[in-house]
Amino acid sequence: MNETVSPRRRREIIDALRRGTVPAAGLDLLAVGLDRFAPAFDRELETTAGGGSAFKAVRGEYGAGKTFLVRWLAERALRRGFAAAEIQISETETPLHRLETVYRRLTESLRTAAFPASALQAIFDSWLYTLERDTIAAGSPGANTTTVVPPTGFPDSQALASSVDELLERRLTAVSIRTPMFAQGLRAYHVATDAGDSASASGLAAWLGGQPNVGAAVKRAAGIRGELDHFGAMGFLQGLLTVLRDSGHAGLLVVLDEVETLQRMRSDVRDKALNALRQLVDEVDSGRFPGLYLIITGTPAFFDGPSGANRLPPLAQRLATDFMSEPRFDNPRAVQIRLPGFDLAALVELGIKVRDLYAGGADHPDRLRAVVDDDYLRELAEALGGTFGGKVTMVPRILLKKLVGDVLDRVDEHPDFDPRKHYQLTVRATDLSDVERNAARIPPIPVADADSVDL
């Protein structure tokens, strides 16, 4: 399988692992232990593509692979024709209680199989193209005319534009009822695009994406005013789903990652954020957002602790799931699923996948597989697990970083390098996050003075 991976895709994956980050794509090549979730996810994606909506909560300790899982799922969704967006919840950058900010981050990270992140304007252009194509396919220059026109064209461009306008109004009827400003912005975007006014079109696309500080002249010419607020954000999301559906996309996968950060917020802000999350879950369940698959990720402390979902009983009830003592009997169809994390066998399997992927593009693949054999990968995993006090779930990120940067690169570069003789595993404070340092019992990085301490 690794021999069929393109050199660019292999390089991007290996470079990300060398940096200690989750690759942006190609996660199917690294997935370990996720097959049991695939049928349930695929069923929910199918429901969403059919005009339904779905919600899922993913719980797991730090290092259990939550971010990996949702990005792996995003790749599956993109292959099915979905658009996808990943939003990192944080107290300062993306507070959950400000849904207008959440919506803006959504549009900034929005991507499709054809377009990378920040694909909103490309999606609008695709939507307008689809309207024009559907109008031409209908073969009628206007709804009130009896003139027979071949399906290959219209008498003139004005007749085509008029018919596209009529179709646009019909498609926007449902959006106009709930969010007239979104529909008005789309109309103005259509006019600016037809007129070749790229500056106004870009400004309107930014406004539709929830961006603040759009030029007053652009908004005045379009007949719109003000900025997007908390209550308008849900309406804009509804309008975006309509545009995605009409432009041929199966739906939208939205990931709210690291919702456990809500526990660190001030109590009044935390309560607002929890209520906003409850509101989102209820709206998904009510069917307000056809085509939306919403996923949140968090630690067990968020789902079970007093500072998390339990602070808002209605939210806790919606997320409640009974887990058995043995994770292998968990129900992947439940509203909340858990990732038990890696054991030693899974860690070795992951190392083998990465070694074979690397070898597929290495200068000396045979020597690399012989020197870095399965037994050595087990030794490396056991040694790193010992550094973390046996907490293997904390190991995957740092293991892959050490494996690629310290072992595989050197074996491929130096013919006489033998990691069993010439490499000694060392884990420094600078290699780890705060959570990983605590698990490894490594002292924190010293600071210059008291003003440098992060409060």
Image (cartoon, rainbow, N blue to C red):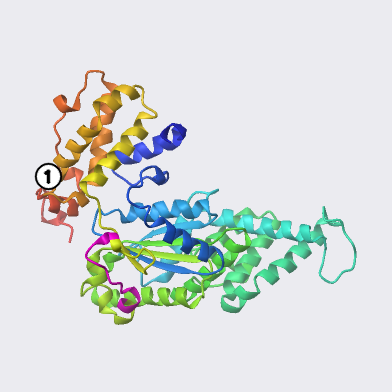
Q: Residue at x 31, y 65 (%)?
A: 259
Q: Residue at x 65, y 66 (%)?
A: 187
Q: Residue furthest right?
A: 147
Query: Where is residue 452, by image quadrant?
Result: bottom left
Q: Position of residue 419 (x, y in %)?
A: 19, 27
Q: Residue at x 51, y 57 (%)?
A: 83
Query: Crowding near pointer 1: few (<14 within 10 Å), some, many (20+)?
Result: some
Residue at image mark 1: 386
Viewer-proximal residue among 84 and 194: 84
Q: Position of residue 27 (x, y in %)?
A: 39, 46
Query: Where is residue 319, by image quadrant?
Result: bottom left
In-image side of 447 versus 294 (left or right): left
Q: Does the magenta-highlighted stretch encompass residue 97? A: no
Q: Amino acid at mark 1?
A: Gly
Residues in magenta, as a range: 316-328
- Is residue 270 shown to the viewer in this render? yes
Viewer-proximal residue among 171 and 314: 314
- Above or below 52: residue 394: above
Viewer-proximal residue among 82 and 267: 82
Q: Does the magenta-highlighted stretch encompass residue 317? A: yes
- Above or below 153: residue 229: below
Query: Where is residue 166, by image quadrant?
Result: bottom right
